Image: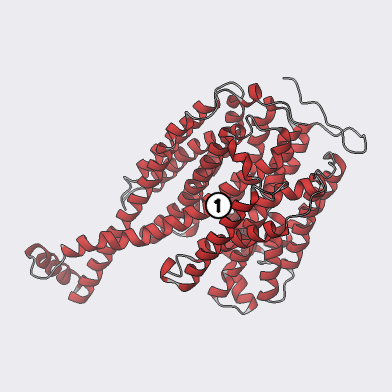
């Protein structure tokens, strides 16, 4: 197998082989994605240590998510304006220093502030890592490079809660942030030494500060709305209503004026490329289903089946290992098989697994759930690399930075929308299914009266019997809501299969000129 030609950095010194650059940038993406989920299980410890309430402590997560979402779509423009490698190193440095400040924070206010800075600096690490890989490897080798990147991005949220819980129990919550410091220092040293430098690439036009502001306000408000919508009962809340208005006005204004800008912050003109537009939609749906199902399945096990967080994690974990094991295999297949076939297979495989989840009952065993989850993630493995590779088909190499930023943003946005929509669906559908079930439990119904009488004699109290039956009705209503949600995700994936036919056929190496 011929190896990619080593690149030359700005100083004329030959860089190391791209296969050694790949793990460096993948580790940077891994570190950033890990910090999205690693703090989830430590919120109670953080709140207790800093004298804060449970509601206040959730801002540790919200602050990171909001600023992270703002950074993702603008990372491509910033990479070009400041020079990609320099910008990448600056982001790692900012993320590392913010992590140190988080670990040493004396109170909740300081912790939230530096979590926001951490999210802002870290938001660019995913798309810039992907763009570096796209340029470092010729098209024929990109799929395997994206496989390494995909393993990092998928593994991080899978192990984040478990790792965060272990560190908090064994040491303290401070170390979930402090562990980033040595990793960041090592990465900065390696990237400065080996990753080719790039000069800034802009045409000298004025910076579109208004565009920056509209993106920041619009995307930040959207992430805030997604994060708090369910708790605030969505549009019954004045806060959510105002946020919706801000999102619509800011983003529509940006879209209208961006086509008149010589150097827009987010170049929406790239969506005229058919493969790029379809790939972004598929990446949004991938994020929606992957993160949505990852949130829903543990919720199902813990709320309806009495599983502990550890037991639920043991069901989810095989799926993460399945993705990591399949990524290199899919990377090899991507160089030999039409990518459209891989995407269609992945959608069908994951969609059928989700549909099967809709047949779960409260008696389903742990092994069955773990295997079905692994079945689902097996299909996911066939989506990430081919969709990412297809997005670059037909794009000029100069668009790689912008393309990578939007793909990462769409996946994260899909995940945020998926979690919010599905959690809301569970609540609303549970109430919907409860109505007919309660209708069958009315006094005067002979079968109902007989059941209450029998349970009252067994439990020694009619009140206890009624309470137990009420919990049974609630559980059945919630089960039906989960069944509907799993079916919805399965159908959503299967409905995307015809869209694959509109992708430009062939492999990216046959259609895309080598990147520089």
Residue located at (71% from left, 42% from top): 401
Task: Return the x and y of residue 257 as percentages of the image width and height.
Answer: 63, 53
Q: Is residue 318 left or right of residue 508?
A: left
Q: How is the image coloured?
A: secondary structure
Q: Residue at x 50, y 64 (%)?
A: 244
Front position in the image: 357 or 389: 389
Q: Quadrant of residue 169?
A: bottom right
Marks counted in the figure total: 1
Q: Is residue 461 visible?
A: no
Locate the N terminus by quadrant: top right
Residue 226 placement, left or right of 367: right
Residue 324 image position (x, y, % from top left): 58, 38
Near mark 1 (Cα within 10 A), the count class, few <14, some 14-19 or many ≥20, is: many
Q: Residue 449's quadrant in the figure?
A: bottom left
Pick the residue in front: 448 or 33.
33
Q: Quadrant of the C terminus?
A: top right
**Left/right of residue 73 with respect to residue 193 in the rendered view:** left
SS class of the residue under badge 1? helix
108 sits left or right of 295 in the view: right
Q: In this rendering, is residue 181 above or below 345?
A: below
Query: In the rendering, at what x and y percent does residue 515 appear?
Result: 74, 30
Point out the residue furthest to the front here: 260
**At 20% from the left edge and 60% from the top edge, which residue is drawn?**
436
Residue linked to disc 1: 413
- In this view of the protein, can residue 300 be seen by the observer? yes
Query: Is 318 located above or below residue 310 in the figure?
Result: above
Give the x, y percent position of residue 488: 37, 47
At x 57%, y 74%, the residue is 56
């Amino acid at each position: 197998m011929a190896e990619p030609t080593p690149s030359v950095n700005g100083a004329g010194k030959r860089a190391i082989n791209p296969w050694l650059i790949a793990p460096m940038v993948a580790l940077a993406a891994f570190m950033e994605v890990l910090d999205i989920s690693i703090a989830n299980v430590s919120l109670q410890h953080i709140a207790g240590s800093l004298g804060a309430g449970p509601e206040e402590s959730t801002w540790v997560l919200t602050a990171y998510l909001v600023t992270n979402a703002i950074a993702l779509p603008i990372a491509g423009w910033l990479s070009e304006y400041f020079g990609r490698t320099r910008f990448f190193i600056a982001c790692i440095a900012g993320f590392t220093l913010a992590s140190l400040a988080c670990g040493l924070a004396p109170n909740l206010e300081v912790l939230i502030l530096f979590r926001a800075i951490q999210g802002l600096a870290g938001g660019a690490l995913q798309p810039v890592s992907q763009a570096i890989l796209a340029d470092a490897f010729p098209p024929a080798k990109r799929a395997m490079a994206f496989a390494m990147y995909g393993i990092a991005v998928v593994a991080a949220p899978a192990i984040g809660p478990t790792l965060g819980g272990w560190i908090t129990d064994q040491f303290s919550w401070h170390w979930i942030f402090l562990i980033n410091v040595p990793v960041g220092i090592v990465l900065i040293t390696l990237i400065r030494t080996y990753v080719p430098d790039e000069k800034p690439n802009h045409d000298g036009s004025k910076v579109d500060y208004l565009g920056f502001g509209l993106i920041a306000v619009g995307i930040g408000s959207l992430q805030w709305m997604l994060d708090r919508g369910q708790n605030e009962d969505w549009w019954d809340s004045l806060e959510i209503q105002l946020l919706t208005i801000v999102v619509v006005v800011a983003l529509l204004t940006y879209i209208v004026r961006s086509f008149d800008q010589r150097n827009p912050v987010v170049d929406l003109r790239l969506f005229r490329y058919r493969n790029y537009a379809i790939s972004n939609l598929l990446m949004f749906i991938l994020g929606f289903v992957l993160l949505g199902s990852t949130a829903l399945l543990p919720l199902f096990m813990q709320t309806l089946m009495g599983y502990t967080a550890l037991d639920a994690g043991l069901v989810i974990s095989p799926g993460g290992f399945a993705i990591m094991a399949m990524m290199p295999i899919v990377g090899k297949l991507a160089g030999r098989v039409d990518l459209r076939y891989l995407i269609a297979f992945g959608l069908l495989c994951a969609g059928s697994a989700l549909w099967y989840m809709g047949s779960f009952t409260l008696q389903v065993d742990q092994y069955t759930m773990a295997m079905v989850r692994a079945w689902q993630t097996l299909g996911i493995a066939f989506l990430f690399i081919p969709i990412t590779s297809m997005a670059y088909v037909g794009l000029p190499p100069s668009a790689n930075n912008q393309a990578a930023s939007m793909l990462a943003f769409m996946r994260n946005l899909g995940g945020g929308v998926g979690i919010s929509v599905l959690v809301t669906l569970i609540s609303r559908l549970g109430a919907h299914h409860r109505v007919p079930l309660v209708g069958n439990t009315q006094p005067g119904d002979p079968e109902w009266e007989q059941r209450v009488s029998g349970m009252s004699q067994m439990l020694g109290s009619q009140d206890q019997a009624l309470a137990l039956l009420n919990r049974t009705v609630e559980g059945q209503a919630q089960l039906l809501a989960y069944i509907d949600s799993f079916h919805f995700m399965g159908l959503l994936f299967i409905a995307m299969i015809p869209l694959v036919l509109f992708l430009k056929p062939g492999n990216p190496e046959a259609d895309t000129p080598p990147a520089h």
